[in-house]
Amino acid sequence: MQESRKSPHRSAEAPASEVCIEVDDLHLTIRRSAQRRTMQITVERTGELILSAPPEVGVDRLRDFVSEKRFWIYTKLAEKGQLQRKVPRKQFVSGEAFLYLGRSHRLKWVDEQDLPLKLVNGRFALRRDAQAGAREHFIRWYSERARVRLSGRVADYQSRMEVTPAGVRVQDLGYRWGSCGKGDWLYFHWKTILLPARIAEYVVVHEIAHLHEPHHTPAFWLRVERAMPDYAQRRAWLAEHGIDVEGI
């Protein structure tokens, strides 16, 4: 689930032609160049989407590439929107809502409890003396739950997908939900635990499949489908709604 790197020689390209395609609600201008060897999506400051590609890449493959990058595109479009408006950050006040496995839980302050932050009876309980480090306490709480839950899902799928990952690590991955690293380690963003359980499970299967196939080839998607027949619906949900998953 990684975005394409920009070519260091982009300025040297001389686009041979420009046409447009639409993928769901996304409208992209295609720029083909004989100097280009890979596909790349650029989000201009105006919000215009540019899809650069070699001349030989067919429209179907272009559409598939855009679909694969939908979450990244929506994220970048949202960033452009932030140039005009400020997105409010979470306030650690009583009544503020925080996600966990796709469900919203209100925050309440408590005077005494054994841990700084707990989920009790459907509400997050934050100890008053932990207010200064509230964000760090939430990230730590999410990360610990993500590590346990995602490790469990990896264990569930690794035998049927015929692979043995080195282990699971949870950290901040920026705009990526997951990554397959060197040494067969699987990395997941701690925010993955904010997603509905069935969507987080798709992220797990997606990354496990990368242990076999590093790129989003037909063979890759076949492996995903074999392990999760309804992956397309889950993938579509993530592409459409993943940008709405609020962080802290």
Image: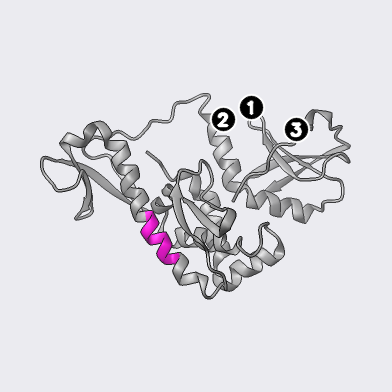
**Residue at x-position 63% and y-position 48%:** 69
Residue 89 vs 105, above or below: the answer is: above
Q: Residue 184 — which label?
A: none
Left or right side of 238 for 4: right
* SS for dot 3: loop
Residue 95 placement (x, y as % from top left): 23, 40
Q: Residues within 10 Å of mark 1 (few under 14, many from 20)?
A: few
* SS for dot 2: helix
**Amino acid found under the numbered disc labelled 3:** Pro
Q: Residues within 10 Å of mark 2 (few under 14, many from 20)?
A: some
Residue 10 vs 164, above or below: the answer is: above
**Residue at x-position 68% and y-position 40%:** 5
Q: Is 152 within the magenta?
A: yes
Q: Residues within 10 Å of mark 3 (few under 14, many from 20)?
A: few
Tally of marks: 3
Residue wearing tag 3: 8
* SS for dot 1: loop
Determine the image quadrant of residue 197: bottom left
Residue wearing tag 2: 80
- Residues rendered magenta in the picture: 146-153
**Amino acid found under the numbered disc labelled 1:** Arg
Distance of label 3 from label 2 (alpha carbons): 23 Å
**Residue at x-position 79% and y-position 32%:** 9
Left or right side of 124 for 76: right
In the image, 136 versus 223, the foreground residue is 136
Distance of label 3 from label 1 (alpha carbons): 19 Å
Residue 48 placement (x, y as % from top left): 67, 33
